[in-house]
Amino acid sequence: MQRPDPAAAKLIPANAEHRYKVTRSDLPLACPMPGMYLWNSHPRVYLPIEEDGGESVCPYCAAQYVLSD
């Protein structure tokens, strides 16, 4: 019987949503984000969000990131 991993319980599925709100504390912005599962996702890519009017789209999964502050 496997025991649940308490550290994994805090992670969110990568690319599960199409729109994510991020703050300046999340910069530099990378998709998938550090708090996401990585085993079934694409390679990490850094996204320019400050230069693009506070919005950016991942070229791999099309997730939209919006800078909220």
Image (cartoon, rainbow, N blue to C red):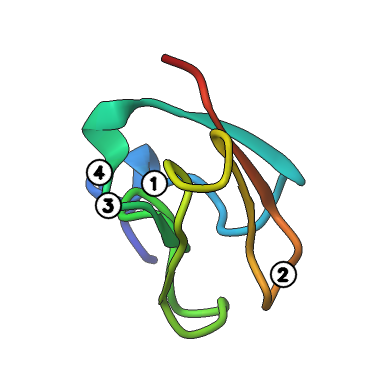
Residue nearer the viewer, 53 or 34: 53
* Label of residue 50 in the image: none
Instruction: Measure the alpha-carbon separation of dots 1 and 2.
Output: 18 Å
Residue 38 spot, x, y in % from top left:
43, 72
* Label of residue 11 in the image: 1
Q: Quadrant of the C terminus?
A: top left
| Circles 3 and 2: CB atoms closer than 8 Å | no
| Circles 1 and 2: CB atoms closer than 8 Å | no
Name the residue located 25 percent from the left edge and 43 percent from the top edge.
Answer: 6
Badge nearest the viewer, 1 or 2: 2
Mark 2 Cα within 10 Å, few/some/many (few <14, many 20+)?
A: some
Residue 67 spot, x, y in % from top left:
50, 29
Q: Secondary structure at mark 4?
A: loop
Q: Earlier in the sequence, mark 1 or mark 2?
A: 1
Asked if 57 appears above or below 61 in the picture, the reply is: above
Residue nearer the viewer, 27 or 16: 27
Asked if 21 appears above or below 4 in the picture, the reply is: above
Q: Amino acid at mark 1?
A: Leu
Q: Secondary structure at mark 2?
A: loop
- The image quarter containing residue 19 is top right
Q: Which residue is mark 4?
A: 6
Q: Amino acid at mark 2?
A: Cys
Q: Is residue 42 left or right of residue 15?
A: left
Q: Earlier in the sequence, mark 1 or mark 4?
A: 4
Badge nearest the viewer, 1 or 4: 1
| Circles 1 and 4: CB atoms closer than 8 Å | no
Q: Which residue is mark 2?
A: 61
Mark 1 Cα within 10 Å, few/some/many (few <14, many 20+)?
A: few
* Label of residue 28 in the image: 3
